[in-house]
Each structure stands twice: as C-alpha cells, then as structure tokens.
Amino acid sequence: MIISYIRTGMDTYDISSNLSFIHILTTIPTESSKTLEPYQDFYLRARFITGLVFYPVMCLFGITGNIMSVIVMSQKQMRSSTNTYLFALAISDLIKLIVDFLYFTVILIGQFDTSTGNRAFAFLYPYAHYVFNASLCVSAWLIVSVAVERYIYVCHPTKVKVYCNIYKARTISFSVFIVMSVLAIPNGMRYRTVLKINNETGATDYDVMLSDLWKNQLFTDVYTWFQNLLRSIIPLVILIILNACIMYGLRRCRLLRSKTPKKYRITTMLVTVILVFLVCITPDTIMSTFFGLGYSEENYLARGIREITDLLLLINSAANFVIYCIFNTIYWCHFRRLFCYTCFRGNPSVTDARNLSLLDASQARSLRRRSEV
C-alpha cells in the first residue's frame, strides 16, 4: 500500500540513489509492469488497492472512533483503572493513525505537484518514522498492562485493591509512554533530510537518506532485533500466556457458578482487544523478525505481503472503538448520551445522566465484589 510503502520503502530502495520517491509511490500497475520482475505486478496492485481504497477509509474511521473513545473515557463517570489504560491506548492509536493519514495526504499532494510532495515527504518522514514506531511500542505495552490487570481480576481477586487502582494505572500508562518514546529515539535518527542538486538542470530538491549511524551494520542489526523484541515478540509471548490464564480462570468460574450473565462482559471485551492485537501484529512480527522479509534484499512477493501486514497494523489501531461499543454497556450508554442524544430522547434509562451515574456506581461496587471481572 502507498502509506506502508513509505514506512518500509525507505529500506526497499537504496536511499542514497536520490530517486524521486513520490514518482515511485504513485506508479499505478500497468500491463508492462508484468515483464519487469516476478511478482512486481502483485506488489504494485497490492500497494494500490490497500493504499488508495482501504487505507484512507480505515484511517478516517479509526481517527474518528479513537477521538470519540477519548471523549467518552474522559467522562467522570467512566473513571476506573481499566478505562485509564484504554484512554491511554486510544491516545496512542490516535497518534499512529494521524501520522499514517499525513503520509496519505503527502502522497496525494505528490500526485498533483511532485516537487511539493517530495519536499513535504523529505521533511516529514524522518520525524514520522519515529512517531510511528514509538506509538506501536506504546500500544503493545499498554495492552500488556491491560492483560496483567485482567489476570489479577480473574485469577487473584484478593489482590485487586492493592494492584488495580486509578493512581497505579495512570502511573504505569505515563511510564509506558515515556520509556517507549525514549527507547524509540534511534528510529528518529535513522533518516536525515538532504538537499540534492540535479547536475543536468541545476534544480534543487530535498530527499531523505540513511544517517551515518544506521549505515553501521552492527548497530542496525542489534537495534532491529532489540526493537522487534520490545515491540512484538516479548509482548506477544506475555499476552499469549496471560490470555490462556484468563480464559482458564473464566472457565473455572463458570464451572463453579451456574449463571454467568453480564458479569464477564468487561473481561470478554478486553480479551477480544488482546486477541485482535495478537492476530494483527503476529504476521508483521513473523515478517520482520523470523524471516526479515519486506526490505531491501527481498523480492516483490515479500513486499506485496508486507503491504497486507501493514494494513493489519492499521486495522488493530482502528478496531478497538467497535469492540468497546459491542461489549462495554457503560461505554455504549455514555457514547449514545454524548453523540446520539436525540436518538434516545424519551428513554430515561439512557438519557438521564443520574441513571448513568447510578449504573457506574453499581459497576464500581460490582468490581469491588469481583462480580464484574
């Protein structure tokens, strides 16, 4: 896809060759492209379909959904340790989606004005590359934090009061943002903006090149593995183990109690968030870590597959809003009160703010009794 190609395309082509990236990125597959190289047509079509069809739609949907989530989660009645993590997760996903949409905008500009598009791309990309990778790390570890909290609720209910409170959730969320942002700083030093001169025409333009630091192969290999471990492998292993423990704990609770109505709705929602994350990030983890596919030494088949894995990362950032609406009754009530009030006028059970506060108070009491885990 166009946008994900910007992220990985810097490694796909020799940056020092000073090619016009906007021209390359906006190339639409033609019949002649089939004769250039095996799977090149597949790659161009995958990039075109995902970038011009799915990517802008998912970005707009995800940005809107995450903004709504931030507004809903910031309501006084929604304050809880779990919602604190979800609020921070919505912020992180929103940042990533905005950066992705900026890339899409730059490419569209480049289709009409190549020079302006190249210049915007050259100045934006070094910073956006850092923000993109930092937000992925932040989101991954916020989801791990949510999984740890759910594990405590389900498997160690006597320790809930000690480890699960708003203050600790805020501290952990803030720490995740700071630590992951610092550890991702080398990504911000990967590329530099340079001024290039056309020897034939004398015209000047801007481009991006690998920095001297990232031309060091030893540093590149070590940091790439470190980043893959931090962003994907370690969170995946932790989440798989915790998810198994949570599901086992829920199954044991169901065996002990004959009725399990709405009490597990919150945990079901969070398990779904975790599962969606696992499904969406696993292909990217396999491509980046175990096979090293999708970069300069790989063929067009690998690059085409990379377009799909990058789209999955976008879906993960945009999907949580839908999950909240489906599983979280309190979230859905507040969402409808804030954004769909006129649709529910005359129904005091959802339009009366006092009733919503009572629902939240009831939920809080239930959490203290471990009846809504």
Image (cartoon, rainbow, N blue to C red):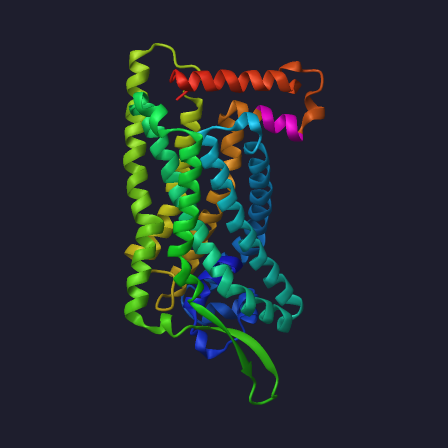
Residue found at x 69% / y 25%: 341
Q: Is residue 202 above or below residue 238?
A: below
Residue found at x 47% / y 50%: 311
Q: Residue furthest bottom?
A: 200
- Magenta stretch, overall SS: helix
197 within the magenta span: no
Residue in front for this viewpoint, 43 or 195:
195
Residue in front for this viewpoint, 365 or 14:
365
Residue 79 in the image, given as x and y percentages of width and height: 51, 28
Residue found at x 54% / y 23%: 330
Residue 246 in the image, given as x and y percentages of width and height: 31, 28
Q: Which residues are magenta?
A: 333-339
Q: Residue furthest top?
A: 258
337 within the magenta span: yes
Count numbered badges in the picture: 0
Residue in front for this viewpoint, 281 or 46:
281
Residue found at x 57% / y 54%: 101
In which quadrant of the rendered view does residue 340 lie? top right
Residue 196 in the image, given as x and y percentages of width and height: 54, 81
Q: Is residue 43 visible?
A: yes
Residue 224 in the image, given as x and y percentages of width and height: 33, 60
Q: Is residue 62 above or below residue 294?
A: above
- Quadrant of the frame with the C terminus: top left
Q: Is residue 263 visible?
A: no
